[in-house]
Amino acid sequence: MDMVMINYCVTVLYYLITAFFFLAVVRNFVSTKNIEEAILYGIIMIPFALRILRLK
Amino acid sequence: MMKLRTAKAAILLIAGTCAAIAGFLFREHRVYREAVVASSSITEVKKLSDYSNAVKGTVNDANVYIFDSGVPGGTVVLIGGTHPEEPVANLSAQIFTENVRTLQGKVIVINRINTSASLGTRMGEAYPRFFHVKTSWGEKKWRYGDRVSTPLDSWPDPEVYIHYPSGQNLAYMDIRNVNRTWPGRPDGLLAERTCFAAMELIRKEKADIVMDFHEAELEYAVENTIVVHEEGQSVAAMTSMMLTSQTFDVPIGMEFSPKALHGLSHREIGDHSDAVSYLVEVAEPMLDRIRGITDEELLMSGKDRFVMKAGEHKLLYSPIDENGWPVDKRTARHVTTLMTILQVHNMLTPDKAVILEGIPSYGEMMEKGVGAFFSNPDASPSERVFYE
Amino acid sequence: MTMFHHSIIVLAVIIAAFAAGKKYLLTTELAMFVSALAGLAAHMVLPKGVDPRSPLMLAETIRHIVEGTFTYFDVCLIFLTATFFMALYKEAGGVAFIVRKIVRTFHARRFVCLLLLVLVMLAPGAITGSGATAVLTVGSLVGSVLLAMGVTEDRRTALIFLLAAMSAACPPINLWAMMAAAGANMPYVGFAKPLAVLSITGALISAFWLAGKGKPVDLEKAMSELPEAPEGWNWPRAMFPFVLLSILVLGGRFLPYSFPVLGLPLIFMASALSVLLVSPVKPAVFRVASTTVSNLLGLVGIMIVVGALIQIMTLSGVRGLLSLAVVTLPLAVLFSTLWLILPISEGMLQYAVAPLIGVPLIMLFNMKGLDPVISLAAWSVMWPLGDCLPPTAVVGRAAVMELDYRGDYFRGFVRTTLVPMAAILFLCTLFMVYSKELSGLIGG
């Protein structure tokens, strides 16, 4: 496998890492009982979601 | 409990709406294609990947516009769009693409060498997504962009970028900066591969001159100047003298490419090919960190009261007054600088002359505005319309 | 109304909204987000001066806020993955194992033990450029050893913070210097020596001032207070994740052209996976990830919100106003106030201060004939000291969180940092003032 392909695989892994933590954020958003925490989780979700969707 | 659920639903709705609106605008920016009407003397439009597979299938597989006179002479390669937050670089290259007629030698133009960097704006800089130039047939629209490739095309960065082949350490994001990755390598990250492919073009086309267009903040010492590889010393010096004494209101300087600074086009292209490499800078107040309100107006007019205030404190390397640094003037300087470099080059090496027609003069661009020199793609023959 | 008035009023609105948010008991992150929104609203409605301006559509304002949240996205990923790695390691009992071994081996040699702890704290920040990463990866481990050495809670937390700040400043990676150098189109070359001199001296001053003296460690008591490590841990198992981490980081450094670009988040995730391979007990991975996100909510939240705030400040000219205000100060005033301005601005804006203030300062110092490399190195050691200051206080809060600090944040923790912090700031100021003279000695 050449280096370009390896670097491409690394990029794919970054989307998986982002998705992994996005899911953890979603889980915490669902389970928190604190409104302020929920708002902050809501804000944090935005860049994670847009990166996973490859929009930014 | 019910209240909490309702609140969470509202949070999701608001966050989702904001993400959707922003996502739509990001996508609109990313998929917008810029029309280019190549001049009637176009002989061929290739892709960068025709010279090297390193960029095949990537967004940086740029259009390469070739204008070959068929008369033996020199070859000049023009590079625009290295840093898409410096729009005049792109406009200057495109003035050549749309107007040039080659009488001797060959002209090769890349309007956007780092397309990826033009597909998103620089985070934290509050840039507009597009800029517009008025023409007689309406407004022509271009993508405004970042200094480096977007992470959507090159992710992740290393902790520190080690330049190939010098081994010099550079900031991590510079691995996405096409003016830090020359001469490039075929199996590196996107910007390194882009430079490698462009080097292959320069070597295979046996280029004599390579010009890389840029803009710089007024706080930056390398300003309103030609930076040149040592091979081009005499041409750049004469060009600087001619333009300063006869044409430009603000002088244009000349300086040598530092030997210890690696990855830059003016150093590496000269070192790794037979071409003489030049880079020109012109003042762009939009790039100054001390600028005021950030919007398209500032980008195009180059007028900024905060930057003027810094000038009063003698903190700038370029003059600025209430007339600013309008895009017409910035583009006119770049185009005229290259034309003068060619004029001097032709004088010194007539067997490698590159003789061009159709390029507007400094006075014409200042009088009519650069918009007068872009054609309407809807009213042009489709075989001459290309998209970036 | 001129553009100056416009930006001053927007700045006032941002400050007022932040203060109001804090008064009405919003968290720092939400108060800052509210201040960004208020600043944006003020920018939209206020006249913008005599020069023509482009219209700003509502949808574009939303785009600006969202785009700003991406500014520190990669830094957030580093925080999350580094903390996840160490949380897994701790959960598996690796931290307890190492701490018990260090205390047993070095309990009688305080000087050597302190040097070792300084080294352990400096390494992660020096490699990653992040003080928070240093705290989140080895902070609790070093904190436990300091506890066993009889260092009080205030001093322990202060020392962890100061070592983390110095580790972020320590070469090879100093993000402030790198970002400012990149902004000024300077190569990141020649910074290693001045940064090393300042940060290592700072770390040693902090360590010996705060933990140099103390009663000899009562080994039996200390061991009985430290948590037990699960059966099955041994040195090879305990070191494997760190060896892997070092190999992956150094591989990219020593074989840059034949080693793939992995980036720190992936390296930390690979190290986290290796914990699962070597650990005798298997931690619940997703539960640890959720706890990590919960613990880092403040840190990640502030980085994302600060990005949005900076975008609005830039849009409205406030960023330019602040930069202009700093660089138009007379040089003598700058020399005598930068030791305050830099840490305070770091507390406000995090890494964004490097391009915001650093770049104009480089231009200014260069123009005044001072050495920009030595000066930038000195500022880049002063900046991280502000990471315990509000509103962001990223590393300070991480230290407090990791060490489970129960004292008063300002009167206990921050006050304890003041003496060594003042010494470091004084040293950096000397470097800045005599940058030209020093450039021959330690310049690149």
Image (cartoon, helix red, strand yellow):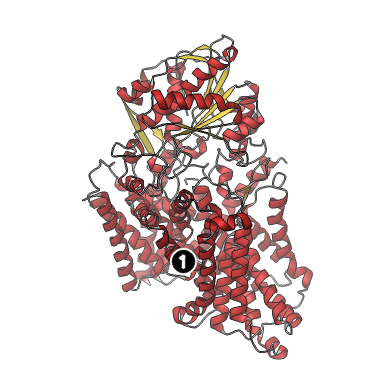
Q: Residue furthest front?
A: C437
Q: Residue furthest left?
A: C1
Of C149 and B249, nearer the camera is B249
Above or below: residue C82 compared with residue B303: below
Tell me what residue is drawn at x 50 percent, y 24 percent: B238
Q: Position of residue B165 (x, y in %)?
A: 68, 40
Tag 1 secondary structure: helix
Of C282 and B146, nearer the camera is B146
Chain letter, disc 1 residue: C
Tell me what residue is drawn at x 70 percent, y 66 percent: C275
Kind of residue indicated by mark 1: Trp
Q: Which residue is under mark 1?
A: C339
Let me know if residue B376 appears in the view: no
Q: Is residue B13 left or right of residue C196?
A: left
Tell me what residue is drawn at x 51 percent, y 27 percent: B237
Q: Residue furthest top?
A: B71
Above or below: residue B312 compared with residue C400: above
Q: Position of residue B186 (x, y in %)?
A: 67, 35
Above or below: residue C66 compared with residue B383: below
Among the 4 quarters of the image, the one containing residue C123? bottom right
Of A48 and C118, nearer the camera is C118
Q: Position of residue C99 (x, y in %)?
A: 69, 78
